[in-house]
Image (tube, rainbow, N blue to C red):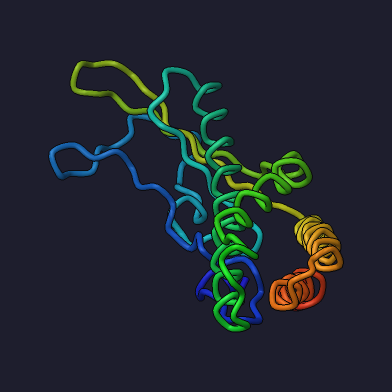
Amino acid sequence: MKLRTVILISTVSAIGLMSIGCASSPKSAGNEVKPIWTSRATVPDWRYGPEKDYEYVGVSQKEATEQSARSDAEENARKRLLDYYGGEMENTFKQEKALVGLESEIGDAQKVRQDVTQQFELRVISQLKIVDTYLEKYRDENGEIYIVAAVRSKIDPSIVKQAISDFGKEKSADLAEKAKAEQNAEKKSQLEKASEFFGSSLSSSLEK
């Protein structure tokens, strides 16, 4: 996914803020703590490697049980997806605002992030599939055992594209209605520009 490496300008493929590495192993006094047990003989490549297209690696906090560790890791994967798309959409809209000269009152980039995050929570998150899990057990300085889980998740690209397309169409329609009702010529023009961005430019910018 080319958007994992660059922040898009104007015409973007809308998706790339979260190109950060996976969480590292627990540390103690500056040294890596070795697990006392792992769920497989070798660490899977995806655990510490770069995420692939439409994949999100979630890592748990220190948990007492495997179930709680898995649940925490899965929640972390969902959060990474939401942060990724929400953050990239916010940056994309900020750049579009600067490019076409949209006034702040016409488009709040932070609100765009909130709206697209809500869209993904409703239409995308439930379809994020967990395709692999890796577990490690550690013993802390007090002798207590804790577990860290990592999960590899994938989302169907068509689901993402449809959710973004729907978001753009809904946002465009709302702004178009506001433009029709606006009497001030300058504000009407601003609303029309914003509507055009969400209705057409946004969709094309998100093509990969």
Apparent side of residue 156 relative to residue 91 in the rendered image (left or right): right
Q: Nearer the viewer, residue 113 or 178?
A: 178
Measured along the vertical axis of the image, is residue 136 above or below residue 14? above
Q: Quadrant of the N terminus?
A: bottom right
Measured along the vertical axis of the image, is residue 124 above or below residue 90? above
Horizontal and vertical percent position of residue 138: 33, 28
Apparent side of residue 69 relative to residue 208 in the rendered image (left or right): left
Measured along the vertical axis of the image, is residue 15 above or below residue 2? above
- Quarter location, residue 207: bottom right
Q: Determine the residue positioned at 76% across, 41% down.
A: 122
Q: Determine the residue positioned at 78% across, 60% down.
A: 171
- Quarter location, residue 179: bottom right
Q: Quadrant of the C terminus?
A: bottom right
Horizontal and vertical percent position of residue 49: 46, 59
Horizontal and vertical percent position of residue 81: 60, 50
Q: Nearer the viewer, residue 13 or 11?
A: 11
Q: Determine the residue positioned at 24% across, 40% down.
A: 27
Single out the residue that lies furthest toward the left: 29
Measured along the vertical axis of the image, is residue 58 above or below residue 180? above
Q: Is residue 208 visible?
A: no
Q: How many numbered marks have been drawn onto this rendered protein structure? A: 0
Q: Is residue 186 visible?
A: yes
Horizontal and vertical percent position of residue 152: 59, 47
